[in-house]
């Protein structure tokens, strides 16, 4: 580690100690891994904007059933991609036993399958991000049952009681 990296690590450790009320946690994630995660988030956001810009635009997800349907559709597509990777791995495996069989085609096919699987995973993440945003908006916009009663006039003003003593028990049945 260079001196600059040590200083950054010390500053990060100090910041974490101050924020966590005495609990110390050190992020040991490599910078390249953090960069990769940030890049993936950027790619997912780009894919989401692409989906939103499609014609016709996707409908809003209004409930968990619609979210599940979208997730299941994407899950099936991702599973099909993984199945293709599995088949290409088998093809590459057959080249190991035969030195006369070229592996270039098998490796190229595996690259293509992995790329398509990555695209399917990114698309699924983008669609789930949209579903999460839509469900959150729907949840925030739906009035609670008490709000519905208040807006719809479901509450009535209490009647004033006459001739009641302070000792009257309201739980007793009228005789």
Image (cartoon, rainbow, N blue to C red):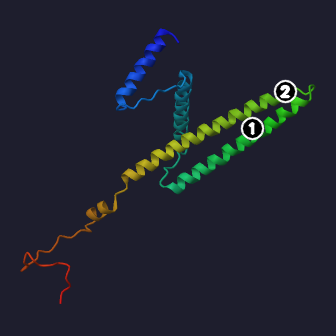
Per the rendering, the mark at residue 85 is 1
Image coordinates of residue 75 in percent, x first then y, are 64, 47
Residue 22's image quarter?
A: top left
Image coordinates of residue 134 in percent, x first then y, are 46, 47
Residue 47's image quarter?
A: top right
Element carrying mark 2: loop
Q: Is residue 88 left or right of residue 174?
A: right
Q: Is residue 97 left or right of residue 85?
A: right
What distance separates the C-alpha of mark 1 from that of mark 2? 15 Å
Circle 1 crowding by C-alpha within 10 Å: few under 14, some 14–19, many from 20: many
| Residue 102 visible in the current orientation | yes
Residue at (54%, 29%) from the top-left corner? 37
Image coordinates of residue 74 in percent, x first then y, are 62, 46
Element carrying mark 1: helix
Q: Earlier in the sequence, mark 1 or mark 2?
A: 1
Report the residue marked by disc 2.
Answer: 103
Q: Is residue 43 left or right of residue 169?
A: right
Residue 27 position (above or below residue 11) = below
Please count the marks in the image.
2
Residue 132 position (above or below residue 95) = below
Residue at (55%, 40%) from the top-left corner? 126
**Seen from this angle, which residue lies furthest front?**
22
Residue at (48%, 55%) from the top-left corner? 63
Residue 175's image quarter?
A: bottom left
């Amino acid at each position: 580690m260079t001196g600059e990296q040590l200083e950054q690590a010390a500053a990060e450790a100090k910041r974490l100690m101050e924020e966590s009320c005495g609990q110390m946690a050190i992020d040991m994630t490599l910078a390249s891994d953090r960069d990769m995660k940030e890049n993936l988030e950027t790619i997912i956001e780009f894919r989401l904007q692409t989906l939103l810009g499609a014609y016709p635009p996707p409908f809003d997800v209004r409930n968990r059933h619609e979210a599940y349907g979208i997730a299941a559709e994407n899950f099936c597509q991702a599973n099909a991609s993984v199945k293709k990777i599995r088949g290409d791995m088998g093809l590459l495996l057959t080249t190991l036993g035969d030195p006369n069989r070229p592996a270039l085609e098998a490796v190229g096919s595996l690259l293509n399958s992995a790329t398509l699987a990555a695209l399917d995973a990114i698309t699924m993440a983008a669609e789930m991000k949209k579903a999460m945003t839509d469900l959150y908006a729907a949840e925030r916009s739906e009035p609670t049952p008490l709000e519905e009663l208040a807006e719809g006039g479901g509450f009535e003003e209490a009647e004033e009681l006459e001739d009641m003593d302070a000792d009257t028990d309201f739980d007793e049945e009228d005789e």
